[in-house]
Each structure stands twice: as C-alpha cells, then as structure tokens.
C-alpha cells in the first residue's frame, strides 16, 4: 500500500478502535504520544511501532495533516480526535443521561476513577478562551466538561459591553450607585439607574439572550467571573477582589442580598472578619454586578417559563409554567382533577413537578 492508502486505513480502522478503547479506559498523554508515533510510522514506513524507524517522511507533519484537497494526506491527530470524542460524549451524556445511566457509570468507573468535574459558572454572555490550547485531563468526563465550557459555551458579545458602558456613563449625570456601610451590611441604592435606558437595556437582553433568572447570581464562581468595567474591558476578579476570591468561592459564600424596595438592596458580608479591604472589595463588586446584571435592582422573581416533560400513560407529556405562574399541560391526556392552579412559590412549583415527574 502507498502512504496515502495507509493514511486512509488509519482513519477508517485504527482511529475508531482507539476511540472505543479510550472511551472505556482514558489514556495518558504519554500513551497518546506513543500511539501517535505508531500512526506516523505506519503511514510513512508501514511499521506500526513506536521505535525510531530509518527513513524520512517526504512532507512535514503539518502538511501531512491537511486534507487531501489541500495537498496533504489527512493523517489523523490522535490527541485532537480524543478531545473531540470527549466533547461529543459529554454533550450526549448531558442531554440523554438519566438516573439509571448515572448509577451504571458510577459502578463502572468508581468514585476514584472519575474525578470531580470543575465547577460550572454563569457569566454575562462572555467566556474568555484559555490562553493555552486544550489538553487531555484525567478522565473523559473532566476533559469533555472543560472543552464544552471553554469552547462550546457562550462567547463575547460586543453589545453587552456597550450597554454596560452606557449605564456607567449614566452615573456621571444622575449620580453614582449609593453605598452606605453599617457593619456587615451594605445598603445599596441604584435608583439612579432606573429609567428609559435601563428599560431598553433589559428589553434588548431579553430579545438577544432570553429571560434572565436572578436566582442564578448567588451561584456565580467569583474567580472565573468576568465582568465588564466602565471602559468596556473585562475585569479579573482575582486581581481586583483578591480578598474575597478564594478557590471555588461563589457569590453566596461571600455575600447575601435582600430587597428592601425597588432599586434598593441590603448586602450582607459573610466573611469571618470584615476588614476595610473586604468592605471596599465587596462595594466594588456590587457596583460592577448591577450594571452587568441590571435585573438585580428589581426584586427576584421567575419571569420566564419552566418546561419539563413527563413519561408514562395518563400523564401530561409536556407541562409549562407560563409567565403568569400558571402550570398548564401541553399534549397528552392530563387529568382535570390533577391539574394544578396558580403557583405562588418555588416550593409549590417543586411539589407539582415531583408529583408529575417524581422526586429528584
């Protein structure tokens, strides 16, 4: 066989088998490098060996990986194939996995084999890709989760930075966000941001990204959060708020807020010892959170829809919580006697979902 034919054999036969093995036993970087050397020796010298082989390839490695239509041989890169396989597999698990699948995975992999995945977080429609390229991690799960978060998540939106800058500019004319410190509590008055600009801002976000749930804010990981400053640049919390940015710390671990009335918050600091530095950093954090998440100045509520499906005969196949907080059935043959009415709290919503779907 020629080198071109052997490269086709590698892609059609060798790579699928290696991916199947890697799915069940995730390889190390050293093992991947050895197999990549075997693949190259097989393509150029017809020897599937990791040892040094006499002779040279007649094109360099970069050109050899190019598609045939571009003058290459389409020699596969095993590391990239494994990274793609991990991302696709984790994405499939996230969509299709159920409790039975999770139990089987725990039994097969074990608690030690599949390490904990990195903590997820939500950012204002921006996630900066890492400066270094993707790398293989300990398991297929941790590798796939990292790839999905870093490269498959939301990307930077220029309009978001412009809107944040507009709210910062508004403070020059109507006054800044007022902060009043009383011990551990920080009284925040953001009434100067209310008005036509705030309304247009939130309406544009609804059209662009959908409804925003304020209840997600306490679970933001501070160390990974990227907020826009008054200049439209992203702020690194590790350098700006170093006193409260512990590893894995979330908003709810550092502070808690309640609404006293519209456009006014009472923020409570949870640190053991509240120093002047911590007070200053918490104040700066609140002044950045409000322009980046303007929905924060309104009392928390569910504005959007909650959708979930049910299985089994005699039940509604799809239910929907409308914006008016009514749980209605869509499709299926729902029993009129079991049809719920108005929902006024999250506890009622959870109870209705558990009744239809079952406890989590």
Image (cartoon, helix red, strand yellow):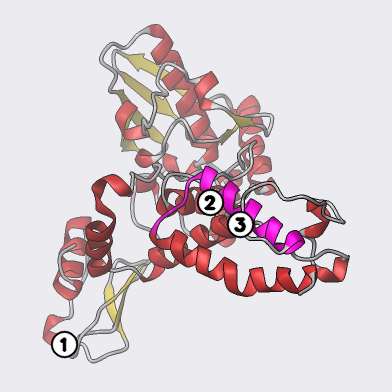
Tell us which disc is closer to us: 1 or 2: 2
Q: Earlier in the sequence, mark 1 or mark 2?
A: 2
Query: Is the residue under label 2 in contact with that under label 3 (CB below 8 Å)?
Result: no
Q: Which residues are magenta?
A: 25-45
Q: Earlier in the sequence, mark 3 or mark 2?
A: 3
How far, Cα to Cα, is label 1 from label 3?
Answer: 57 Å
Rendering coords of residue 53 (x, y %) = 72, 50
Could you say which disc has been placed on residue 78 in the image?
Answer: 3
* Among the 4 quarters of the image, the one containing residue 326: bottom left
Q: Main secondary structure of the magenta part?
A: helix
Rendering coords of residue 205 (x, y %) = 56, 54
Viewer-side residue, 359 vs 68: 68
How packed is label 2: few (under 14 Cα within 10 Å), some, or many (20 or more)? many
In what quadrant of the picture does the C terminus appear?
Answer: bottom left
Could you say which disc has been placed on residue 147 in the image?
Answer: 2
Task: Tell me if residue 125 comes above or below residue 22 in the rendering.
Answer: above
Rendering coords of residue 292 (x, y %) = 54, 39
Q: Residue furthest front?
A: 54
* Among the 4 quarters of the image, the one containing residue 336: bottom left
SS of the residue under disc 2: helix
Task: Tell me if residue 294 comes above or below residue 182 in the rendering.
Answer: below
């Amino acid at each position: 066989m020629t080198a071109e034919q052997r490269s086709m054999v590698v892609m059609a036969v060798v790579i699928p088998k290696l991916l199947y093995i890697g799915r069940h036993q995730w390889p190390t970087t050293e093992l991947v490098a050895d197999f990549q050397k075997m693949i190259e020796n097989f393509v150029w010298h017809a020897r599937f060996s990791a040892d040094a082989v006499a002779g040279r390839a007649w094109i360099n490695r970069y050109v050899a990986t190019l598609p045939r239509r571009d003058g290459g041989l389409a020699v596969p890169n095993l590391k990239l194939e494994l990274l793609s396989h991990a991302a696709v597999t984790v994405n499939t698990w996230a969509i299709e996995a159920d409790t039975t699948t999770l139990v089987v995975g725990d039994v097969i992999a074990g608690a030690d084999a599949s390490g904990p995945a990195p903590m997820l977080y939500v950012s204002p429609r921006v996630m900066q890709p890492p400066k270094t390229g993707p790398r293989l991690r300990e398991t297929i799960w941790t590798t796939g989760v990292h790839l999905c978060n870093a490269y498959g998540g939301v990307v930077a939106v220029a309009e978001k930075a412009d809107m944040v800058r507009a709210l910062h500019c508004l403070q020059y004319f109507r006054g800044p966000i007022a902060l009043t410190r009383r011990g551990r509590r920080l009284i925040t008055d953001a009434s100067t941001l209310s008005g036509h600009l705030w309304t247009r801002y939130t309406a544009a976000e609804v059209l662009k990204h959908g409804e925003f749930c304020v209840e997600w804010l306490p679970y933001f990981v501070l160390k990974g959060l990227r907020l826009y400053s008054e200049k439209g640049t992203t702020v690194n919390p590790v350098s700006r708020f170093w006193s409260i940015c512990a590893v894995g710390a979330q908003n709810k671990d550092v502070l808690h807020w309640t609404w006293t009335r519209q456009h006014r918050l009472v923020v409570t600091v949870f640190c053991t010892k509240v120093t002047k530095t911590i007070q200053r950093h918490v104040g700066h954090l609140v002044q950045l959170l409000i322009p980046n998440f303007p929905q924060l100045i309104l009392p928390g509520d569910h504005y959007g829809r909650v959708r979930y499906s049910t299985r089994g005969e005699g039940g509604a196949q799809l239910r929907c919580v409308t914006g008016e907080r009514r749980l209605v059935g869509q499709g299926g043959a729902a029993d009129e006697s079991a049809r719920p009415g108005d929902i006024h709290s999250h506890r009622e919503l959870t109870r209705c979902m558990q009744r239809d779907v079952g406890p989590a």
